Amino acid sequence: MSKNKKILIVDDELDIVTYFEALFQDGGYDTITAFNGEQGFEIAKSEKPDLITLDITMPVQSGVRTYCQYKIDITLKNTPVIIITAADDSMSSFLEKLNGITGPEGFVNKPVDPEKLLQKVAALLSVKIN
């Protein structure tokens, strides 16, 4: 069994998922993937990742709804989440929909700067609350 930190990548675009998988694996992390919010929530519950990257605009279930599920679930609420999205006004509209739930631990716009993303991941994983 690997002792590497595990990152769940939730995005509906295969090329993005593949890119993040390579980036995180090259950075020494294990990865698991989901292609919509509903699948992402179920996988997070079963796999217990150390960190989640989450797209906002996805089919089946939005990233906003999925994020809220993570933060109200007793086993996932302390898992850091980085929102990664191409939408320019996502942060303000995202936060307006949270209904009192705290905001994400990170927020990154696409296109992603890989070094900055890896730095953010490393910083969040070094201070993860269990």
Image: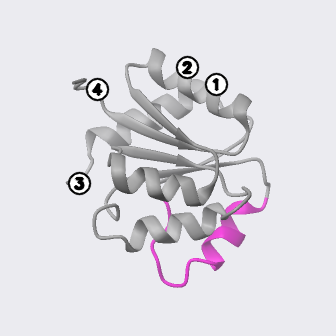
- Lower sequence index among marks 3 and 2: 2
Q: Which residue in the structure is indicated by mark 1?
A: 19
Would residue 112 appear left or right of 82 to someone viewing this image?
right
Instruction: Tell which tag, 1 or 3, sits nearer the viewer.
Output: 1
Give how far across and how far down residue 26 sits, in percent: 47, 15
C-alpha gap between disc 4 and disc 1? 19 Å
> As shown in the figure, which amino acid type bears the numbered disc 4?
Asn
C-alpha gap between disc 3 and disc 2? 26 Å
Residue lying furthest bottom in this view? 99
The disc at residue 129 is 3
Instruction: Tell which tag, 4 or 3, sits nearer the viewer.
Output: 4
Residue at image location 66% in from the left, 64% down from the top: 61
Residue at image location 39% in from the left, 27% down from the top: 30
Give how far across and how far down residue 119 sits, in percent: 45, 31
Q: Is residue 99 magenta?
A: yes
The secondary element bearing badge 4 is classed as: loop
Q: Give the residues drawn in magenta, as a range.
A: 89-104
> As shown in the figure, which amino acid type bears the numbered disc 2?
Ala
The secondary element bearing badge 3 is classed as: loop
Q: Which residue in the structure is indicated by mark 4?
A: 4
Residue 43, placed above or below residue 90: above
> As shown in the figure, which amino acid type bears the numbered disc 1?
Tyr
Residue 17 or 79: which is nearer the viewer?
A: 17
C-alpha gap between disc 1 and disc 3? 27 Å
> As shown in the figure, which amino acid type bears the numbered disc 3?
Ile
* Cβ atoms at labels 4 and 3 below 8 Å apart: no
Q: Which residue in the structure is indicated by mark 2?
A: 22
* Cβ atoms at labels 1 and 3 below 8 Å apart: no
C-alpha gap between disc 4 and disc 3? 17 Å
